[in-house]
Structure formats: C-alpha cells, structure tokens
Image (tube, rainbow, N blue to C red):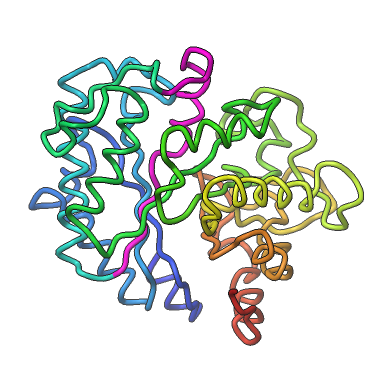
Amino acid sequence: MISLIQTQNLKPDIYDRYVGGVGANDWTTWNSPAGAYVTIVAGEAASVGAVPMFTLYQMAAQGNGNLSVLNDSSFMSEYWSNVQLLFKTIAAYNKPTLVNFEPDFWGYAQAAAPNGDPTQLFAYVNINSDCASLPNNIVGVAGCLIAEARKYAPKAYVGFPPTSWGDPNDPAGVIAFMNAIGAQHADFITAETLDRDAGCFETMNTTYGCSRNGTATGWYWDETNTTTPNFSQHLATVLTWHNGIGGLPVVWWQTPEGVPSSTPGGSAYNFRDNRVHYFLTHVSELVAVGGLGAVFSTGEDYQTNISTDGGQFQSLSGAYFAAPVSLP
C-alpha cells in the first residue's frame, strides 16, 4: 500500500490499519518483538506524512457478535494486556495517533443489553488493575479503553463508532446508548458508510463476500439526493450523532473506493460505488455535519482499491487538495 501511495503521489492525512485478535496469532504476534506491528505501521504513516490510525478490533476474535468473550476472564485478561501494549507502543512513537474503538461491537452490545442498558451487560473489566475502580459491565469496558489511552499515550486521540443497527428503529436510542457508555468523553466519533462497495452487494456473490441479508438494491446512493437512499440522508444521521454525542468531530472510516457507474454490480476489484466521488466533491457538506476527516479503504478482499479504480482517488484527492475546505 505504501508503494502505491508513493507511486501515485498521494498525500494522505490519515493512514489506517487494524489491530485485531486475542490469543494465538493476534496482532501482538505479527512482528517481533511483541507489538512491533504498531511501530511499523506508525513508521509507514510517517513516511507519507500521515497520522497513523489504529482500528482496535479485538472483541471479534472469536466471531463477530460473539459476546460470550465478555464472560471469559482469560480472554478479557489478554484483551486488556493487548490494549495496554497498544497504547504503550503508541506512546513510544510520541506523535499524534488516532485509535478507533471496536467497530460493530457496540451495536451488538446494545442489542444484547437488557432494555438497551449497558450497565446490565456483564464484562470483565476490573481484572485489569488500571481499571480496578470501574464496573464489570459495558460502561466499564468503554471507560477502561479511554483510561488506558489517557494513562499511557497522552498524544493518542480516541473515538467510538455509533452503530445504527444497534437500535435501527430509533436513532435517538443509539445516541443514548453511546452516551451511556461514555463515548462523549472520547475525542471523536467514527462514522461508516458501507463495509463493501455497493456493487459488491448488488451482485450478492458469496465467492467475493458480497452476500448480506436484504435485497440486491438500495446499496448505491443517489448523488442528486432526490431518491432514497441518498447522501443527504446519511449526512443528516451523522449530524444527529455529532450533536447528540458531545458535539465531537466526526471521522469517516473504511469508506469504499468504487467508481460510479450506471450499471449495477461489477466484478472482483471493480465493483461500482460513488462514495469517494461524492465525498471528495462535496467536502463542505461533510464539514457542515461535524466532519474532521475521512478514511478511504477496503473493508474486505476483492473490493475496488486505488490500484484498480482507474485513477479516481488520485484525481479527486488531488483536485480537493488544490482547494481544500477550511475546518471551523
């Protein structure tokens, strides 16, 4: 990826990588010594003038949505040990760094918590001596993540991703849940549009991970904002999150990189999507709803990327940086 960024003379502000797993073959083992992966990624970010961003994705180590790990003291002990190592390594880097806390997890937690109350969903927290005063529940999990960042890596900025499907019929319920866990005490919130190119889901091709509940329509948004679904609707939701969760700035994450097309679908590495096109030609609209930045990346193999997008990202990002939008 670094070579592609350099070859295309891209100027990213943020360089994002996952840190995932708990146990054998988790992120702490990917390089030596333990945790060196974080140092390597931070160095790669610095080489292209970007701020490193780490997406902590450890809760899904035994299956996305498998919340039984919260009741597993062995798992949670190792979970917290890895979190400490992450922030200690970030501290050694000694430069600003972003950390995105556990995408998807909060939606599953909200759905599982009795009456949507995070204090009623047990999790081992105070087995971590740094968080001995925090409760053994989901509120404690979120609080401990923030506490570890503040203790070990004061130059780290951390954020939580609201999950619309945590309470799909009540956006206010999502905001209430995120505030109940203390997300408003972080530094930003993370927003996502889709974890695949729209065209991927339009094909419903299981070979390429394009299968999902629902129909093959409605994934591609209307750029004219006249039919549903559209970008104005998404931005209105993000504005609600921004206003409702501490007025925190918004970082879009894992925004798919497909190229607009009037033909639904596509093929491996060339599925259609129009989020890059809309975002980079309507940046003022993102800023107006609290936007601080946007990360563009693939959420799965076989998606369109900067080596298969026909130069779309190179062209649009170059045009944007020639006349950037000022932040408030």
| Image location (x, y in percent) of residue 297 | 51, 55
Question: Would residue 124 be found to the left or right of residue 12 on screen?
Answer: left
Question: Would residue 187 be found to the left or right of residue 97 on screen?
Answer: right
Compared with 111, 316 (above or below) is: below
| Image location (x, y in percent) of residue 127 | 14, 26
What's the magenta region?
96-118
Compared with 32, 306 (above or below) is: below
| Image location (x, y in percent) of residue 270 | 64, 52
Compared with 91, 226 (above or below) is: above
Measuring 48% from the left and 81% from the top, which residue is drawn there? 9
Identify the image quadrant of residue 84.
top left
Can you say which quadrant of the picture contains the C terminus? bottom right
Report the front residue among 168 and 58: 168
Identify the image quadrant of residue 130.
top left
Measuring 31% from the left and 40% from the top, which residue is drawn there? 20
Report the front residue among 258 and 134: 134
Measuring 17% from the left and 54% from the top, which residue is drawn there? 152
Q: Is residue 26 highlighted in magenta?
A: no
| Image location (x, y in percent) of residue 193 | 63, 47
The residue sitting at the top extreme is 114
Can you say which quadrant of the picture contains the N terminus? bottom left
